[in-house]
Image: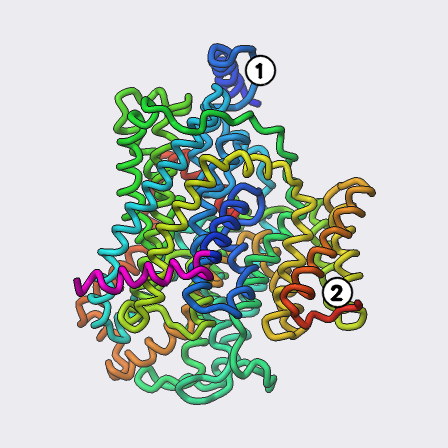
Amino acid sequence: MEFFGPVLDGFNVVLDPTNLLYCLLGVVVGMLIGVLPGLGPAATIAILLPMTYGVEPVTAIIMLAGIFYGAQYGGTITSVLLRLPGEASSVVTVFDGYVMAKQGRAGAALGIAAIGSFFGATISIIGLTFLAPLVASFALDFGPPEYTALAMLGILLVATISGGTKIKAIIAAAVGLFLATIGRDGFTGAERFTFGNLSLADGIDFVPIAMGLFGLGEILYNLEERHRAANAPVKVSKVWPQRKDIKEASGAIGRGSVLGFFLGILPGGGATIASLASYAMEKKTAKDPSRFGKGAIEGVAGPESANNAAATSSFIPLLTLGIPANATMAIIFGALLIQGITPGPQLINDNPQLFWGVVNSMYIGNILLLIMSIPLIGVFVKILRVRAAILAPITALITMLGAYTIRNSMFDVLLVVLFGAIGYLMKKFGFEPGPLVLAFVLGSLLESNLRRSLLVLEGDPTGFFTRPISATLLVLFIFVAVWPVIKSGIEKRKAGSLASTIASEKEKENA
Amino acid sequence: MDAKHARHDSTEKSLTSELTPEPQEAEALTPEELAAQWEAEAAEPAGPIANLLSSLVVLGLSIAGMALSVGLGLGTPSAPAAGMWPFVISLIAAVMAVAQIIVGRAGGRDGEKFSALSWYAAIGFATLILMVVLMPIIGFEIPSLLLCFVWMRWLGGERWRSATIYSILIVAAFYAIFIAALGTTIPRLF
C-alpha cells in the first residue's frame, strides 16, 4: 500500500471542485483549439499563462495539461471532416479518415478515433503511474555531470527532431541559452549583459518570451496565412462505432497505444512521430496494405491512439527528470517554475499531491474528452464554422490584456508584442521558436550544473566520461549530433518517407 | 501538373466515383496526391538572400556576444568566470551561422518568402503597438475596439456590418470578464 497511498490521495486532489472545473476548462479549450485552425497547443498554453498566476500550482498544471491532450482529440475532427489536420499529430489521420468521411462513414471515423484516443491515453496514464516513480528514483542519484549531459541531450533532441533546418534550430537553441544568461550570475554575482538596466538584473522573464514567441508570433503569422473558409462539414451521424468497426480497429488501437507510450517518452518528437510510426506499423502488419488510403479504419484508430498515448507519456521526462520533451512541455515547465516548483526527481516525494493530482486528472480529463467527442461531437463540428477573421482579434486581445495582468505593467505588454514580432520573423526565416524557448527554460539549469561539474571534476571535461550515466548520455548526444549527417548520406540514395515529409511541413506551420 | 501526376489523378477519379454515389470533382485523396497538393499550396521558401541575411544577423549578434563575454572575463575551465558560458554559446551560434551560410547558399526549403500578404502581419503589428501606446492614456476599450475592427474588416475580410457588431460584442465581453468579473486593474475609460 506504500506505493498506492499517494496515488489514491491524488484522486482526492482531482476531485476538489476547483481542480475539476479547471480540468474541464483545460480540456474544452484544448478541444476547441484542436478543432480551430491556427493556434496550436503550445501557443494556447503560452497565451493562457497569466491565468495560472492566481491559482494553486496543481490546479494550473491540471488545466495546462488538459489543453495539451485535449488538442489531440480536437485535431482529429478537422482531419476527418475537412482534410485539414488541426495539429501536426493528426496529419496521417487525414489519409484514411477523410476518405471514410467521403464514404459517409465520418461518424465511424470520429467515433473510433475518440475511443482509440481514450484507450491510448488511459494505457499511457497507467504506464506513467508505474514507470515515473522508477525513473525518478533512478534519477535521484544524478549529480551535476548527469544533469548537464541530460539537459544538453534534451535540447539537442528537440532541436534536431523538430521540423525545419537542423542548423537553424541549433542556432535558435543557442539564442535561448544566451538569453537565459542575462542578469546576475549566480556564481560570481557579476551582472551579465544588463547594460546597467535594473529591470534586467533578475534576468528576462519567461512569460513574455513564451507569450510573444509562441502566442503573438503565431497570431501574426496566421494573419497572412489565408485560412480557407471551412466548407460546410459533412453531416456526422452514427458516431457510436459498430461492433464490426471496433473489432477491426482493436488491434490497431492496442499496438498504437503501446508504441505511442514509448515514443512519447523520448524527447523531441512525441505525438507527431508516434502517429506516423503507428500508421507505418499498421500498414506493414495489415493483411491487405492496399486498403490504406482508401478508408481503412485501422489507419485512423492506430495513429489516433498513438498520438494520445505519446502526449500523455511525454509528461514522464518533465515530471521525473525535469527535462521537457517538447516545446509544450517547456512552457509547462516554465509555468511550474513560476509557481516556485522545480520539476525533477524529487517532485514525486516532495510534492506528491501535485504529481499524482496532475497524473490522475488525466483520467478525468480523458473521460470528459470522450464525452465531448462522442455524444457532443455535433457541438464541435458546428464550431468549425466560426471564422478565423473573428477569432484572431479575440486571441490577440486575450494575449495583450493577459500580459498586462501579470504584473500590471505596460512594459510586459510591450515585451510580448516585440517578442511576437521576433517570433513571426523567426518563422518567416525558417527558425523554430520551440528550441529557443526550451533552451531558455533549461539555460540556467544547464549552466549551473555544467559549472558545478567542472568544479567537481577540477576543470577536466573528460571527467564526464568517467561516470557511466553521464558518459552514456554524452555518447548519445554525440550520436544525435552526428546522425543527421549520416542520415542525409543514406537518404540521398533513398527518398525519404512521404508521410514524414508532409508531417514536418505541417509541423513547421503549426509549431 | 506533370504527365505522371495527371495519370495518377485520373485513375483515382475513377476509384472515387465507384465509392461515392455521384461522381465528384477531381479531389486529391491518396497520400501521394495530398502531399503534392500541400506542397503546391505551401508558401515559397525564403530563398538564398533571406538565408544569407538571417545568418549574417546571427553571426553579427554572436560575435557581439563573444566580445561582451570576453569583457566579463572567461576564467579557466576549472574556475570559469562569468563570461565563459555565454562565450561558448556565442561561439556555437557563430559556427552554426557560418555553416548555415554555406549549407543554405542555394536557399533551402525552409522559411517563407515575404508576399503582399505579409503587409497584413505588419499592419497587425502596428495596431498592437498602437494599442500599447494608447492603452495607458485612454484605457483599453477604444484601442481594443479599433484593433478588432481593423483585424476583422481589413485583415480578415469581414463585412462592415459584421465587423462592427462583432467588435462591439467582443469588447463588451472583455469588459465583462476582465473588469466586471475578475476586477483587474487594466487601464480603462469607463
Residue position for label 2: B140
Q: Picture quarter containing residue A186?
A: bottom left
Q: CA gap, disc 2 to disc 1? A: 50 Å
Residue with the most extreme bottom position: A189
Q: Picture quarter containing residue B57?
A: bottom right
Query: What chain letter is assigned to the residue under label 1?
Result: B
The majority secondary structure of the magenta stretch comes to helix
Q: Are there few (<14), some (14-19), or many (20+) residues within 10 Å of tag 1? A: few
Badge 1 marks a residue whose secondary structure is loop
Q: Amino acid at mark 2?
A: Phe
Q: Amino acid at mark 1?
A: Gln
Q: Earlier in the sequence, mark 2 or mark 1?
A: 1
Q: Percent from the top left, x then y, of residue A60?
A: 46, 63
Q: Which residues are magenta?
A: A1-20
Horizontal side of A148 relative to A198 (left or right) equals left
Q: Is residue A447 above or below residue B11?
A: below
Q: Is residue A82 magenta?
A: no
